[in-house]
Image (cartoon, rainbow, N blue to C red):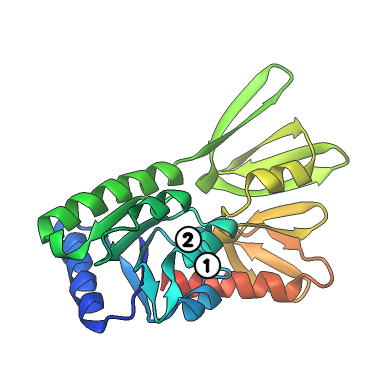
Amino acid sequence: MNAVFCMDDETSMKTHVSMLEKFGNKNKIPIKISIYYDVSELLFHMTEKEFQTDLIFLDVEVAGESGFQAAETLRERKLLGEIIFLTNVEDQWEKAFDVQAFHYVLEENCSQERFDWIVNKAVQKVTGKKEETLAFSCAGKRVVVPIRDIKYFEVRERWINVYFENTHFEFFSRLSKIEELLTGKGFIKVHRSFLVSIHHIASVRYNQLSLQDGTEIPIARGKYQEVKSRSERMEDAQG
């Protein structure tokens, strides 16, 4: 699980990072924690990593910048993770609803026990999202596939094959429609005929990538840098 803290109070930051580490150790959940002290730095590094960030802890104001504005920007970038505001500001909790925050927590009332309860609920919600599925139908047959199991889509005219686990399923649709459905969920269109899950990429070469199962897929001219960059950022985030 990946967590991000963006706060400008170093003491508060250390306190809550420690609380999250205790939560992870207690529940045997490996958590990679990234720390930012200003909003601009956060947004710069979150450009390509939003799809794999599970929890974001924000203050209402960070180094003179609005935490609410940062959250709104992340939502516009299709952040799927849960946002938790950690703050001493009592009267702005209503704004948290506008950016679909999971919780608005006053630091003075946040014991380890309460922190654990809130984070546990957020983790349950994140886990539920990770189990999202897509359903595909054709000629009376229907399959439901967990998004995390999908390796790639290949289009031939208007027919699309979705490849998952050790099989595939053919259905009638447009690749652009599938791409829209999977916005922010770790897929990238590497070629006019291929939409690939970044999580399943093993290596990237100039005009071709390899998946973890050995499948090789062409990369369109001009797409190499984007594919390589996003693949490397995912590897860095997973540590």
Tell me which residue sits at (48%, 61%) in the image: 52
Q: Which residue is mark 2?
A: 52
**Extreme residue in the top direction:** 140
**Extreme residue in the right direction:** 157
Nearer-the-camera pick, 101 or 172: 101
Tell me which residue sits at (88%, 41%) in the image: 157
Tell me the tag on residue 49.
1
Image position, residue 103 (x, y; %):
31, 52
CB contact under 8 Å: marks 1 and 2: yes
- Amino acid under label 1? Lys
Element carrying mark 2? helix
Q: Is residue 85 left or right of residue 14?
A: right
Q: CA distance from mark 1 to mark 2?
A: 6 Å
- Amino acid under label 2? Gln
Please determine whether, in this image, residue 153 is positioned above or below residue 2. above
Please determine whether, in this image, residue 49 is positioned above or below residue 81. below
Element carrying mark 1? loop
Query: How many neighbours does mark 1 have within 10 angstroms: few (below 14), some (14-19), or many (20 or more)?
Result: some
- The answer to whether residue 146 of the structure is visible from this angle is yes
Image position, residue 56 (x, y; %):
38, 63
Tell me which residue sits at (15%, 64%) in the image: 108
Q: Is residue 237 left or right of residue 184?
A: left
Nearer-the-camera pick, 108 or 52: 108
Asked where in the image residue 145 lies, by quadrant, the reply is: top right
Image position, residue 8 (x, y; %):
33, 80
Tell me which residue sits at (72%, 76%) in the image: 225
Tell me the tag on residue 224.
none
Q: Quadrant of the N terminus?
A: bottom left
